[in-house]
Amino acid sequence: MDFSWSEQQRELLDAVSRFGREQLNYDVIENDRNAVFNHEAWKKCGEFGIQGLLVPPEYGGLGQDPLTTVAALERLGYACKDNGLLFSINAHMWTAVIPLVFNGTETQKRKYLPGLCNGSLIGGNAMSEPNSGSDAFALATTATRQGDKYLLNGSKIFCTNGPIADLLVVFANVDKSRGQDGITAFVVEKGTPGFDPSHKIEKMGVRTSPMAEVFFENCEVPAENLLGKEGGGAFLFTRSMTWERGCILASAVGSMQRLLEKCIRYANERKQGGHSIGKYQLVATKLVDMKLRVESARHMLYHYGWLAGHRKAVYLEAAMTKLYLADAWVKCAEDAIQIHGGYGYMTEYEVERELRDAIGAKLYSGTSEIQRNIIASLIGL
Amino acid sequence: MKILVTFKSVPDPYESAAPGGSPATAKSVINPFDEIAIEEALRIRERGEATEIVGLTIGPAAVEEQVRAAIAMGLDRAIRIDDSRALDPYAIARILRAVVAKEAPEVVLMGKQAVDDDSNQVGQMLAGLLGWPQATFISKIEFLQNQTRARCTRETDAGLEIIEIPFPAIVTTDLRLNEPRYVSLPGLMKARKKPIEVQSCDDLGLKVEPRTKVVATERPPKRSAGVRVETVEELVAKLKEEARVI
Amino acid sequence: MVAKTLILIEHDRREVKRPSLHAVTAARQMGDDFALLVLGHGMERIAQSLVSLGAAAVLVADDPVLADPLADRYAAAVAKAFQKIGATTLLATSSTFSKDILPRAAALLDAPMLTDVLKITKSNGASTYRRPINAGSMLATVELTGELRVLTIRASAFEAPPSDVAACPIEQLEIGSLPDGARFISREERTSDRPDLTEARVVIGGGRPLKDKETFDRLVGGLADALGGAIGATRAAVDTGLAPNDYQIGQTGKVIAPDLYIALGISGAIQHLAGIKDSRIIVAINKDPDAPIFHMATYGLVGDLHQIVPQLIELLSQG
């Protein structure tokens, strides 16, 4: 098994590291405090090529394989401290870009993908509802066909990028009597009458990523904005969700690595009782465990990435990756605060923010409980 | 108007072995000062004051990663003089003189120093060999009179100096001249398709030997960390009584 | 006259720059006879101030065309003087002045050059030179081949020479025609009551956390004045407009070695440390306990400099 990167991969990954380090780390504490989205940084990421990593070149992307993509996101997560920016980028990639790549018509792809790749368009999806989170397909939002358009009615919650999105992939049911076989996906563009994404939701972490409660009131969506086919929404959602599970915490592996290094530096420099605190076993153990956690998370991520490029069915690996990386990130962040003591609790040392950002990982893209259910059923229980 | 920008591949000054990780693989980058020179050349072309920006580096095949990065920034073409010897600034200047004779640029732009060698000599030596005017450590450059001369602001120990030089000329760049654009991934992909011209000293009809030999390198004596003080009073007391420096 | 070593002296048109004289110490260490070279216009007083340093002669090229230092004519004049006295070593103290001129002169003389030499050792008739590389994180020991060599030395590595020898002659140099393509337009230099950054016994350095020019001048300047010291700045501080470029200390700015260096809000990037590590005492005041500068500070104080520095100024002004 060859664990080395090719020269081309190395050049790409090094370019990502440098870009992230030099271009994206400013005003993070303040933007987090005020829940401000860094649009300028978003655009730079688009121009740099992040949002389009996986998209075929003919639609404005870079056509990279999944392993290179997750490695690039890991580097970005290491270099860029704004976890919220990365969360918005991820939501955009997995919930809007991927569905269009796999299920869009040629017209839809040519219309939306170039802008979604180059940073000029922001995408997201609207799936969860006030009464359906883990019970994903129990949707109340309806879509009624009327001539050459659909009327959408209902509300969605936890819509990442909602307030700033140029388009959302919205899931609604065209025929409730068919249950989940009625679920259908639509591309709803900003400014469509009857579409209100302006109700912002304030969050504990990844605060620089805007989130909204979204309302549809006789929202008229043209029939050409149907994504995939009527009744194909559940399948489309599951497929893009599998991508999301495997990939969305790639940048978290980078964040964890950064935390680990920060903690080791601190443990070596902070002296109490006559020597550095890293010499105390209780502190050293936390760091050793952190190191093990980061390395195994990275290996799991890369393995998933490699598999996603080599075979179609990666549901098990995607769920395992999501579950393990989320737990690892939260634990790393928690230990990082403990190791830094009082300084870890202070906003300006940027350690406490990591924990606030990490906790969401156990909730989005399927809670850790859901991931466990999935894995249980896939290992034959 | 053709501008020749020379650049060097150097070990990444930012990268050092990160704690807690595997030993850092030695990474190379374009010398930061040369990157500033490339950026300035690109801006001059964007203003319509130059038509061709040619990049030039000297080194073994391994430096082609930096050549690609330079092309990705926007060079029209790039040349690598294949040479893997440890060359000194004077040898480099003599090689550059031969390339300048071939390429006949109006302006040669380069960083004032390489951050690994810290010599700050090549540009000035090249100017001396060619008998061309030089403007070193510039923080600003304006082309004048239909791109036949330039007004340059130089950073000196005492402040700033403004001089004017006619072309052809050598210009070396200082830190505050500009902030280089970052290489984008699409740029990197496109750069892979542009060929890099490779030549050797033989091709240039040159026989150049360095006259400097590094016989040893060592770490300077490490300055050990001292003590932490808790208060301003304690600091002043120590400076007065212990260090006796005030 | 003949001499083996020619030293280019730097002045600011009014008087000699004192660090420039440290090259004399290097020449004395090398053991050969040396001559001093002054270029400019209206140089009588400056030339006179150099006669007791033990040189074989003070050579002066005094001409309106040399009124301002432009490398094309200065390097040509240096090369002419060098060849006239049959020298084999060209020497100067490192500065933007000597770095602009000496490499060009080296090319004219077909000689290799070393920048920022810290130490010259002679054994079996051959010399080796030690100089910093990689922002001073490494020291290289180097040999040169050939008859001729050009060196700049770092002022902090050689002492100021005594001026106590019997006076030597001053010789006017005929420079003939010199290149005149470049034109000097103007200069921007501030005068200050504070000591020169490269000569001061005490230096206060300010970093980016000082927020704005007013705060920088108040805190860094205030502390400098309380101690009779000079002001320096990190590259980041200069880049953000807190201080002018000639305050910059570091790998690509000035290298200093004062008795006392106090770093305010400076994290200690290796490029800055390159400029201060030979200081006798280093004090670091920074609110980040992780900051690398604490690795090499003699005394470290973790805290908010906006509160600490005013206290420090007050305490120093009292006693």
Image: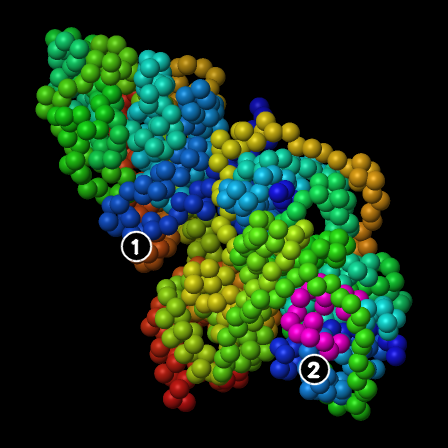
Residue type for callout 2: Met
Residue positioned 19% across, 34% down in the render: A212
Q: Are callouts 1 and 2 both on one chain?
A: no
Q: Amino acid at mark 1?
A: Thr
| Residue assigned mark 1 | A347
Q: Secondary structure at mark 1?
A: helix
* Location of residue C303 with respect to A60 vertically, above or below: below
Location of the N terminus of chain A by quadrant is top right
Q: Position of residue C1 (x, y in %)?
A: 88, 79
Residue occupying image coordinates x 66% and y 32%: B196
Q: Chain of mark 1?
A: A
Residue C185 versus residue A169: which sits nearer the camera? C185
Q: Main secondary structure of the magenta part?
A: helix
* Residue C119 x %, y %: 74, 69
Q: Residue at x 55, y 61 (%)?
A: B153
For mark 2, what is the residue?
Answer: C43
Circle 2 residues within 10 Å: few <14, some 14–19, many ≥20: some
* Discs 1/2, front: 2
Give x and y (percent) for residue B64: 65, 36
Q: Is residue C75 magenta?
A: yes
Of the 4 image quadrants, the one containing the C terminus of chain A is top left
Q: Is residue B227 magenta?
A: no
Give the structural element (helix, strand or loop) at label 2: loop
Quarter occupied by residue A231: top left
- Left or right: residue A255 versus residue C110 is left
The stretch of residues the image draws in magenta is C61-79
